[in-house]
Image: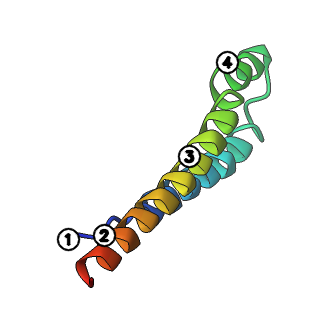
Amino acid sequence: MRGFDLSSGASKLALAYKQLEIKWNAATDSWHDATAKTFHKDHIEPLMPDVKQTLEAIGRLAEVLSRAARDIADEGGR
């Protein structure tokens, strides 16, 4: 049975979000008007809870898949 690698996808998502934060912080050095504030409120802020929830869900799914793989392996060894 082929293994599932959810950790690399989760790592990429976490890294992408971190890079977004870094780029956003750099942008706000020169872009700090009302439009920037609105953009941040409407587009950047809502991402964090979604990213966090997604990473938590990936972690739970990885645990379930790992358990299922162990169970299948245990049954095959009987």
Give the amino acid at mark 1. Met
Residue 57, disc: 3
Residue corresponding to mark 2: 72
Helix, strand or loop under label 1: loop
For image coordinates 78% across by 41% down, the residue present is 29
Query: Which x, y percent locates residue 19?
Result: 59, 53
Q: Is residue 78 left or right of residue 5?
A: left
The number of numbered discs placed on residues in the rendered structure image is 4
Marks 4 and 1, Cα distance to the nearest angstrom? 43 Å
* Mark with earlier residue (1, 3): 1
**Amino acid, disc 3:** Ala
- Residue 1 numbered mark, or none: 1
Q: CA distance from mark 2 to mark 1?
A: 9 Å
* Position in image of residue 18 (x %, y %): 64, 54
Can you tell which of label 4 and label 3 is closer to the viewer? 3
Using the image, determine if residue 22 lies above or below residue 38. below
The numbered disc on residue 42 is 4
